[in-house]
Image (cartoon, rainbow, N blue to C red):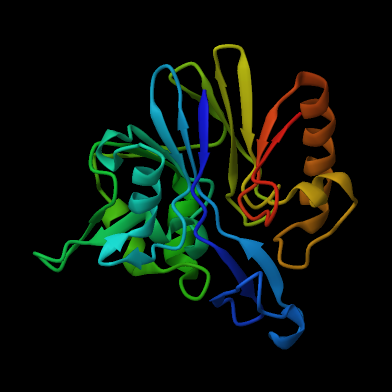
Amino acid sequence: MQIFPLTEGAFTVGKSKKFIPFDKENDELQQRETGSLLVEVQPFAIVTSEDILVLDTGLGMEENGKLQIHQNLLRVGVDPLSVTKVLMSHLHKDHAGGISRTNHATGKRELSFPNARYYIQQQELDFAFEKGFPSYIIEDLECLRDNDQVVLLHGNGVIDGYIKYELTGAHCPFHQVFWIVDSGEKVFFGADVAPQLQQMKSRFVAKYDYDGKKSMELRRQWWQQGQEEKWSFLFYHDIKMPIFMG
């Protein structure tokens, strides 16, 4: 497998839930809103023997009129049109902003990866429309409904025999995580239940989680098992360590 972090940069996020760009060289965290967290926003691309996968889709920002996640893919030699599967942990705006884009010719929103299937928990999609702003941006998600490219998942299961998904909740009620097993390698993507390396190593209950204690216990369980089985961990919000080889 080839794994490519697709970083969109560092940001601070506080009670307002706004993601404000942070220059790690020049900015001071103390000057931001009290209680602000410093996070990376970092989708991943994985090239397996069967697919080109994208794991979550970032904030949906644009560079020179082009979607940033597309630009990041091109930089690592991956054509966005070649992506075959998009695996969504959940639909919070920092994970699903790039799930769709505006077609500047028609003015309509369309899925960002036209040749891919999108794998999303049915209950998460329903919850996103129920909950709405500020955690979810409904305009970005409208084109997921009644779309043949979208595969709605229910609970736990396996995709094409090598991608395992598990409904964990914990960060939000219908958050899911993924294991990808290919050519003897196992990659784990815990998204916002396991967002940073340091959280795997300490007993930490996050106030921003739907069930912080469950998140903590899951991290402890995954870290132990992953160390024993030599998983590669992908950390969506880690400033320094996007990939950790167990």
Image quadrant where residue 31 sits: bottom right
Is residue 132 in sight in this rendering?
Answer: yes
Name which residue lies at 34% across and 52% down.
71
Residue situated furthest top in the rendering: 184
On the rendered image, what quadrant is the C terminus found in? top right
Task: Give 222 or 52, whichever is nearer the viewer.
Answer: 52
Image quadrant where residue 17 sits: bottom right
- The picture places residue 187, in percent across and down from the top left corner, at 62, 28
Is residue 92 in sight in this rendering?
Answer: no
Q: In this view, does 191 lie to the left or right of 67?
A: right
Give the number of marks. Answer: 0
Residue situated furthest left in the rendering: 105
- The picture places residue 233, in percent across and down from the top left corner, at 68, 36
Name which residue lies at 55% across and 36% down.
155
Q: In this view, does 110 lie to the left or right of 152?
A: left
Q: Is residue 157 above or below residue 108?
A: above
Q: In this view, does 108 lie above or below 123?
A: below
Task: Give 214 or 130, whichever is nearer the viewer.
Answer: 214
Q: In this view, does 13 lie above or below 193?
A: below
- The picture places residue 207, in percent across and down from the top left corner, at 77, 67
Residue situated furthest right in the rendering: 203
- The picture places residue 70, in percent across and down from the top left corner, at 33, 50
Task: Give 64 or 212, whichever is nearer the viewer.
Answer: 64
Image quadrant where residue 147 sits: top left
Name which residue lies at 70% across and 26% down.
231
